[in-house]
Amino acid sequence: MSKEVGITVSKNEDFSEWYTQVIIKAELADYAPVKGLIVLRPDGYSIWESIKESLDKKLKET
């Protein structure tokens, strides 16, 4: 499969495919050898940690 530059599908036409392309091309995650599994890359994991910390803080406030 050749590597294409940029996003090849419109967000309005196919949101799922658009989102997948954004995540993969931004190098936030990669597909794992196990079908249906993705692995977070360092930047993706950093974003996840920030989201998790914010949610934990909000949940503990209630």
Image (tube, rainbow, N blue to C red):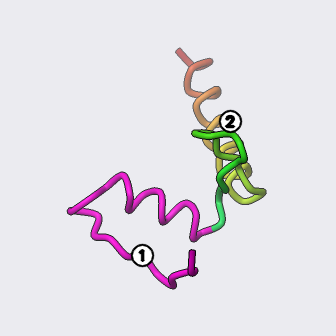
Residue that lies at the very extreme toward the front in this rendered image? 1
Query: Label 1: which residue?
Result: 7
Residue at 27 percent across and 58 percent down: it is 14
Q: Residues within 10 Å of mark 1 (few under 14, many from 20)?
A: some
Q: Residue at x 51, y 82 (%)?
A: 4
Mark 2 or 1, nearer chain start: 1
23 inside magenta stretch: yes
Residue type at mark 1: give it.
Ile
Residues under numbered marks 2 and 1 in contact, where contact means CB atoms less than 8 Å apart: no
Which of the two residues, 56 or 18, is positioned nearer the viewer here? 18
Picture coordinates of residue 9 (x, y %)? 32, 71
Q: Position of 3 compared to 14: left or right?
A: right
Report helix, strand or loop for mark 1: loop
Q: CA distance from mark 2 to mark 1?
A: 30 Å
Q: Point out the stretch of residues depicted in magenta.
A: 1-26
Task: Categorize mark 2 by other alpha carbons within 10 Å: few (<14), some (14-19), many (20+).
Answer: few
Q: Residue furthest right?
A: 42
SS category of the residue bearing label 2 = helix
The residue singled out by tag 2 in the image is 53
Residue 57: x percent and y percent? Answer: 63, 28
Picture layout, residue 12 above or below residue 54 = below
The answer to whether 60 appears left or right of 9 in the picture is right
Q: Tell me what residue is drawn at x 57 percent, y 74 percent.
A: 1
